[in-house]
Image (cartoon, helix red, strand yellow):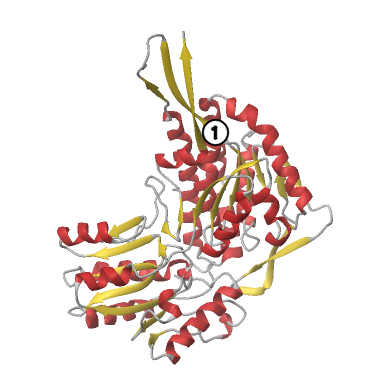
Amino acid sequence: MFKCIINNRFVESSSGEVIQVKNPANIENIVGEIPSLSADEVEQAIEAAHKAFNSWSQMSPVKRTEIIKHGVNIARGKIDEIAHLLTLEHGKTLREAKEEVASSIDSIEYFANNALSILGETYPANKKDRFSIVIKQPVGVVVAIVPWNYPLLLLSWKIGPALATGCTVVAKPSYYTPLSTLKFSECFIEAGLPEGVLNVVTGRASKIGKVLTEHPLVSKIAFTGSTAVGKEIMKSAANTVKKLTLELGGNCPMIVFEDADLHEAVKGGVRRAFRNAGQICNAVNRIYVHKEVFDEFVQRFVESAKKIKVGNGLDDSVEMGPMTTKEGWETVRKYVEEASNMGAKILCGGKKPDGEEYQNGYFFEPTVLVDVNHSMKVVKNEVFGPTAPIMMFETFDEVIQKANDTEYGLVAYVYTKDLSKALKSAQLLQCGTVGVNNVSGGEFAYPYGGWKQSGFGVENSHHVYDEYLRLKHIRIDF
C-alpha cells in the first residue's frame, strides 16, 4: 500500500478506500494500491502548504537550494527503483523510464541552481528624494496537476521552479501512474523539506478536483492535460482569480520538404510518432511530405515502423510498450477504423499485435496511414497513440496552411536543408515550439508552452520563474 504525503506524514485515506494501479502490459497484474482521499483530506494538504509558505518563502534561496539538491542526490541513488515502478504502472520501456527519471532529476537541479540568479529591478527616480525598486515574490500555494504520460518529468517541470522560488506545493498525480511520483517525492521529504512544503495527494478527480482548483488558499494551478479539462480548470479557478499555467493538447505537424535529408526525417518522424506509444503531447500527429519525395519517404517510414518491437517494457529488447489506458487504446482503434472506412489505406499496424502475450494488455501496433485528410479524426484530433497519417503537398503556402489548420498550437517539426525555407516556416507556423531538422519538442533549458487552445504560460527555462512569482513595486520617499 502506497501512502500520500501530507505535512511530511505518510497517510492513508481515513475511509480506507483505495484505488488499484494496474500494469497495462497485463491488466490482471495489480502493481499497487493508493489512497482515494476525500475532499476534507485534500483540504488538509492545502492548509499544510499554506501554513508552511511563510517560513519557506522567507528562507534564504541558498538554503532552499541546498535542501532541494540534497533531494536530487537521494533521487539519483534510486533511479532504478523509481524507473521500475514507472514501467510497471505506465508500460513504457525500462530504458525510457530510466531516461525520464534521470531527466526529471536534472530538471529540478537546473531550476534550483538558476533560481539563485532571479533579480529585481531599480528605476530612476522621477522626482528628487524618491527611489523605486521592483521585487519578485513567490505567489503562494501551488497546485500541480500532473498527467500519466510523463508523470515524473511533468511533475519536475512544476515543482522544480515552484519550490526553488519559495512556493509550497500540493501535487496530484494521475491515479494511473501515482506510484513512481510518490516514491520520487519521498526523496525530497527525506532530504529535509520542512513540513507542508511538498504534499502529494491521490484520488479521483470527481471527488477532489474541485477542492484543488477552487480552494481560496491556492494561489496558482499548474496543469498539463487535455484542452477539455484545462477549460474546466479555468472555469473553476475564475471565482478566486488564480494564476494559471496550462499546457494542453497538441496536434503537431511534421513537414518534409523536397530537399530534406530523408534518412534523418524518417528517423525523427518514427521516433516522435511512436515513442511512448505516441502518448506525448508533442508527438508527430500528422506528416506532410512534398510530392517529389513522398513515395520514397513513405516506403522508408513503413519499413522503420515495422521493425519496432512491441512488448512488455521490462523486456530490454522491446522498443515500444503498451498504451497506458483502456480508453486511449479504444480511441486509437476507433480513429483508425473510421479512417479506413473513409478511404484511408493502412500500410502497417492498425490493430493489437498477434500472440498470447499481448492479449491482456493495451498493445497497439505502430500504424502508418496514407490517403488521409483533415476530415478524419486520426488527422484532426489529438490521437495520443501510435499512429502516423502521411499526406502529400505541392507548395509551400499549401503546407503551411494545412499545418496551421488546427485549434492546437504546441509544437511543429520541419525538415529542410534550405535555411530561408526553415526560418520562414518557423515564423509562420502557429505554435510555441518549432523543431527544424530535429524532433526535440521540449527541453528544460528552453521555454515550452502552447498557442491557441494548446494553453498559455510557459514551462522550463529561466522564463518559467515568472509563472511562480509576482511583482511588487516599492516606492520610497525620503
The amino acid type, in three-letter code, at marker 1 is Pro
Image mark count? 1
- Residue 27 in sight in this render: yes
* Residue 447 drawn above or below residue 322: above
The x, y position of residue 168, in whole percent, is 61, 38
The residue drawn where x is 33% and y is 81% is 302
Q: Quadrant of the N terminus?
A: bottom right
Judging depth in this view, the residue of 244 and 253 nearest the camera is 244
- Residue 153 in sight in this render: no
Q: In this view, does 414 lie to the left or right of 307?
A: left
The x, y position of residue 427, in whole percent, is 25, 56
The residue drawn where x is 61% and y is 50% is 237
**Callout 1: SS:** strand
Judging depth in this view, the residue of 403 and 370 nearest the camera is 403
Dot 1 crowding, Cα within 10 Å, few <14, some 14–19, many 20+: many
- Which residue corresponds to mark 1? 138
